[in-house]
Amino acid sequence: MSDDKPTGEERFDEEARIEAEEEALEQETPEAVGGGDYAPSVAARVSAFQRAGGAVIPIVTTIFALLMGMVVVAATGHNPLTAFKGIFDGTGLNWLFPWVQGQARTDAAFNLQQTLIVTSTLILAGFAVSFAFKCGMFNIGGNGQYIMGALVSVWIASSWVDMNGSLHIFLAITLATVVGALWAGIAGFLKATVGVHEVISTIMLNFIASYFAQGLVGRGGQLQNTVDTSNPVSSDIAPKTHLPVFWGDPILQGLHVGFFIALGAPIVFWLVLYRTTLGFEVRATGFNPEAARYGGVSVRKSYILAMAISGAFAGLAGAIDILGWQFRLGVLDIQIANIGFIGIAVALLGRNSAIGVPLAALFFGALVQGTSTRNPAIQDVFDPRLAGNLSTIIQGLVLLFVGMDLLFIWLWNQRRRARHAATGAAQQPQGATR
Amino acid sequence: MAETEVVLALFSITKQFPGVLANDSIDFELLDGEVHALLGENGAGKSTLMNILYGLYHPDSGEIHLSGKKVTFSSAKDAIDAGIGMVHQHFMLIPVMTVAENIVLAQEPTQAEVLLDVGEARRRVRELSDRFGLAVDPDARIQDITVAQQQRVEILKALYRGAEILVLDEPSAVLTPQEVRELFAIIHELKAERKSIIFISHKLHEVLEVADRISVLRRGRKIATVPKEGATEESLARMMVGREVLLRVEKPPATPGETLLAVEDLHVLDDRSLEKVRGVSFHVRAREIVGIAGVDGNGQTELIDALTGLRRFESGSIQVAGKPYARGTPRGMLDAGVGHIPEDRHRRGLVLEFSIAENIAIHDYCSPPASRFGWLYPRRLVARAARLIHDFDVRGGGPHTRAGALSGGNQQKVVVAREVARNPKVLIAAQPTRGLDVGAIEYVHRRLVAERDAGRAVLLVSLELDEILSLSDRILVMFEGEVVGEYGPDISEEELGIAMLGGRRKAADAA
């Protein structure tokens, strides 16, 4: 049956097109989407908003956020252009310019490796939010799932030192992924069975994961370092479980092969969503759970599995951080972990799409690395004590404006409307003379 | 009409959307104290024209004159200030606030400039509702009152803002037949108070009943403006669609076969655990259409939900083609051979964000040929959709078109195509023509008869008496969760109306 030629497009006569276009126009306005005799799901509403702006809006949002960052820098009495040049160089993206040579190129390569390490994790953290979103859920628990993944991988990789290296890595990564999935699956299960809202449950699970992990690697914890008992950190993982570094110096924290795992994530994300029956069920549930149920989809199953797959992405992120560059997990690491939260911004800016999320992850990865206090370029511009705060401010501003994405779409629509008004008014006299 | 002052005149309104000429130099005139109906199929340009009048769209050319003076609206606020009130099809009310609060919203009477004067608000609302015969309780919350009452609140809101011209956009679409009567009484009251009303509809008999004059739009152009006198449903339908339309379905008498759906003493609870279906028994045979008539909310929805596995039933039995289904799931009933055209195609019948192909696959995505071992074959979905789009004459897009971008009639064709193409033994059609225009209604009706003749058992549930009477071979009346009577297809509309209100219960029991 697959070799049947589609004949639908041929039936595209003018009359039908008029009907469709007008209906579409009515659908496109936010009013039409918000009101109505049924309440569209969040996923459906966002999808309607996104059709309105396309890829333009996230780019405009990003530029605006960076401009605001410059204003803040200028307000502190520093030259915003110098500061942002410093930040840009700190990301290592100048490595892409052929005229950067010599020591500058070596530095740039190192910086870019760091940026891509963060990007790898963020891609996975972003999909952890996006996948649940495709099912109409907000996974705020990426951070907890990430911590659980990190904890499991540290435990596996620091135990059974006699195991075969590849198998050991495989086991650590797989179990971390599974535990991340189970951890998020709890929230999906609670939503599917007793209707607990996933935002509440995932936030609570974040706290549980955080304190559970701190208890295990902290002083007196079961996973605490057996060699250096004075520090609240876990044992180091076995050297053979370190992920191979393919670019840069392994001693200087080069880029590890986890990067390729992250690059595979969008493919997996897209295939699962658009080429499996599970993805079909997840998307149907996300857009309209009632229609999905009517169609014969088990909405409960969709909720549980979508959350679990989200958690798998986050757990995997935790594993590649541990095996790729962290090699141990300390109480402090757990306390300051915010990858799961940046993942929310990545998903928002990346529009939950297989292409958008990696690009957004690169942007945030670059931002995190470029504004890092370890970036010497930043320290040249600012007092080192100030640099840390400014970095946080700039990151915060970008997050804020990305979160205000919908505001920009609204403004965009206003602008279109205003333009219609202007042309309408200009043609008014013309109509009067007829 | 004592005088014939023109309160509103639209001259040569033209509005172009990308690729679509939505309004093509439309002239329109509204007299003082007149009810002027705007009639047209979905997509004919009624909404665009009214949105231009209400300041939401700007015409590419053309003028709006109010009482002889030219006006330009740049927003809805301008239109409201100029005395134009609009009651949208979908109400713009805040559910948790009271009636009075909703009505005075944005123009609240205040004490000391900042405090809402609740007493004053209540008083003004009462005064308005007394004057126009619009009975509502000012202190009731919107979420607690009926749809018909919400509509009254919308009308009151417009009147409170000083509307002289009222635009009612498909006001009867959400109402029961009784409520429509009440609405018409309100419209007469408003007319007596010299308000001018634009009544948008695609229901011919309503338009003939309530309007003084009727303007017909088709594909962005005004075809004609005619007085009510002399207009007939047939003549209006011809103007609307552009061809002769069969308003009555022609069908050969039924030749029922074996029983395909048998329901015995069924009891179903609603979401609030109230018993909505109370011991219903009936059967539907192959090659017959059984219509269930009744006022909305008498258990029809819960009955359908139980038959399709979307709701559990407390006791009783459902048999499809002789096999009992004790605890149906949606999947189980689908597999048993029950097809279901749901009453709300936006909430349940379609995933509007999905393509037509995906919507057509919503039941069978999980079995070959659509998928194998969980792996989906989108090309096969598209090929199947293309075939159904062709067979069922769905217009306005191909397999990849988003379902939400189709017109209502074509959306319903997608639903009908999907359900029929599964070759169900039992086809349940709930309000299958709700919100559709004349051409699409004709199509759906003919299709249901064709499916009957193809050997299916068709169960039709509708609030439209016309539909029940013209399609059904047997008619069951539901009242307060029970089947209170069974009638032949030749029962009169009046008799059926009385039965629907429970009046003939005794007589039916005796018969």
Image (cartoon, rainbow, N blue to C red):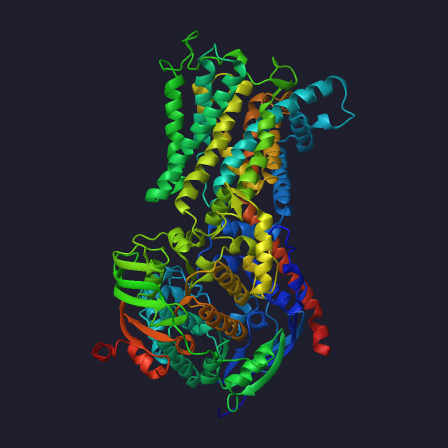
Q: Is residue B491 visible?
A: yes
Q: Residue furthest top?
A: A227
Does residue A161 appear to the left or right of A420 in the view shown? left
Q: Is residue B117 visible?
A: no
Q: Residue furthest right?
A: A99
Looking at the image, which residue is at 32% across and 67% down?
Answer: B283
Residue A260 lies in what quarter of the image? top right
Q: Is residue A362 above or below residue A412?
A: above
Q: B272 or A2, which is in the foreground?
A: A2
Q: Is residue B297 above or below residue A303?
A: below
Looking at the image, which residue is at 68% across and 26% down?
Answer: A89
Q: A188 or B262, which is in the foreground?
A: B262
Q: Residue furthest bottom?
A: B2
* Count of labels in the image: 0
Q: A26 or B254, which is in the foreground?
A: B254
Residue A357 position in % (x across, y down): 58, 38
Q: B160 or A136, which is in the foreground?
A: A136
Looking at the image, which residue is at 70% across and 67% down?
Answer: A426
Residue B254 position in % (x across, y down): 41, 75
Q: Quadrant of the C terminus of chain B?
A: bottom left
Q: Is residue A317 above or below residue B216?
A: above
Residue A209 position in % (x across, y down): 39, 27
Residue A294 lies in what quarter of the image? bottom left
Does residue A49 appear to the left or right of B158 in the view shown? right
Residue A36 position in % (x across, y down): 46, 61
